[in-house]
Image (tube, coloured by chain):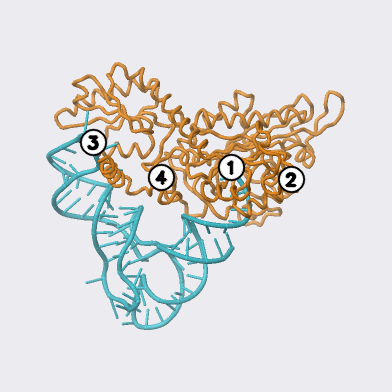
Amino acid sequence: MEQKAGHEKTAQDKDFVKEITPKAVDYSQWYIDVILKTKMMDYSPVKGFMAIRPAGFAIWEKIQELMDRRFKETGHQNAYFPLLIPQSLLQKEAEHVEGFAPELAWVTKGGSEILAEPLLIRPTSEAIICDFYSRWVQSWRDLPILINQWCNVVRWEKSTKPFLRTSEFLWQEGHTCHRTEEEAEAETLQILEIYREFLETEMAIPAIAGRKSEREKFAGALRTYSVEALMSDGKALQAGTSHNLGQHFAKVFDITFLDQDDQLKHVWQTSWGVSTRLIGALIMVHGDDRGLVLPPRMAPIQVVIVPILTKKDRDRVLEAVSELSAKLKEDLRIKLDDREEYSPGWKFNEWEMRGIPVRIEVGPRDLDKNQVILVRRDTGEKEVILRGELSARLPQLLEQIQSDMLKRALEFREANTRCCSDYEEFKKIVEEERGFVIVSWCGDAACEEKVKNDTKATIRCIPFDKKPESDQCIVCGQKAVATAYFARAY
RNA sequence: CGGGGCGUAGCGCAGCUUGGUAGCGCGCUUGGUUCGGGACCAAGAGGCCGGAGGUUCAAAUCCUCUCGCUCCGACCA
């Protein structure tokens, strides 16, 4: 009996989501289907570039709003730097140019004239910003410099995937200068914590914060830290990075200041960023076979009101829902879907696909009983509630959904995080289970390289609070110095 | 950048083997009836078949080149 009922439900669901490939059938196709069907983005005629449509951009605006607030609260200011960088500037830092050279886009012509020096479209702005900073910093009194910019960057990627890896993407990049190494390190870690906390609080995505291995660190950095999230297919995604640049850039760009002790010194720098990739993370962590599932804090529309309009009761239902909508708009992001060309059932499915956290249904029968129906997107649960209690109930319900979503994501990550001390078993886990695998590691890049060649898994990060689980490196058996999270990654 | 798959109406596809009037479903437009989980009827609009060459009396169909999407590798936020 139960099985049959389940079967019928599946058939019905399948009919509804006919244009979204189920996750279990083809995860990548599911991801693309969701993005296209929900009109988050569209491909452009140029490979690797895309239009971010209003449905996707609204999420980016939410990320900007909530992230920017945190930057401002910690003393940062926004600015804007040029799109084009002279070739000679990028070349100053050797590791940096080597790291980015393969994926640079060049401007070689201005109007009809060939440029004397080729310009490159920023793949990241360290070079151009350092050039400015070398003039802006004179005295210890000028420090710290705490500047962020929201902009686009271009990296000529060989293989691209919407939001996760595109040739042009939007991001924020913070670039700071400090008087001491300690101060720069503190800034690097403060930002890392902002990223981790942002992902958890606002996006309901639990993330592991830690340090990158030498192999994975940013080209030109002293140390790179990152926050790493686990997608629902078991692959990891680097969700944000924070770099302690040390004095590498300060020395080649000559960013110096006269300190209180009358000595000319180089500044200590950091840079850090998150990108539109976060939109991809949001989709992959929370989405299901019916489409997007947005955490209430990120949702551009938190509650959609769908009136049930029949010929006889049309006017009084419309009147009731517009009154309701106006009232709720004072505190929440509300959408009233009073279009008459679509049936209620069509609208239910449409808004579910678009991930709106809560739906309110109001029909003639509800009006008669002075009630409305609330439906959660994340669980599908319905509840009937008196109209007078709605204003109090909705914020509470949205908070509940937000915390339930984080809880489920956390449970998923826990269930897919495994400790391991045997290399054969490690290989098996990576191949068959995916997820994070926590292992002890000797710190040698050769062992890291071997793991990558054997399994495609890389060190995602080395968390701060973990001592080695065992005293032997999982690969070579030598003395372990660190505990590392390994995973296959996007 | 290497290997596979795919480009035909806004979307999903058929037609290609064996060259000969470009089709179907959804969507769209107009009118009407509907509306508690993707409503129905009727009448319409919309295409030089990704692009460029070639073969041919004739090319969506055969050949060559190219561009794009997608998947798998290598590279990377």
Amino acid type indicated by mark 2: Gln
Label for residue A478? 2
First reached walking from the N terminus: tag 3 or tag 1: 3
Amino acid type indicated by mark 4: Val
* Chain ID, mark 4: A
Q: CA distance from mark 4 to mark 1?
A: 29 Å
Helix, strand or loop under label 2: loop
Q: CA distance from mark 2 to mark 1?
A: 19 Å
Q: Position of residue B58 (x, y in %)?
A: 34, 77
Amino acid type indicated by mark 1: Val
Front one among A420 and A273: A420
Q: CA distance from mark 3 to mark 2?
A: 70 Å
Q: CA distance from mark 2 to mark 4?
A: 46 Å
Q: Please state which of the two labelled residues, at mark 2 or mark 1, is closer to the viewer.
A: 2
Residue highlighted by disc 4:
A34
Q: Residue at x 40, y 39 (%)?
A: A292
Q: CA distance from mark 3 to mark 4?
A: 25 Å
Residue highlighted by disc 3:
A340
Mark 3, other Cα within 10 Å: few <14 / some 14–19 / many ≥20? few
Give the colour in which the image draws chain B: cyan
Q: Please state which of the two labelled residues, at mark 3 or mark 1, is closer to the viewer.
A: 1
Q: Position of residue A146 (x, y in %)?
A: 67, 29
Label for residue A437? 1
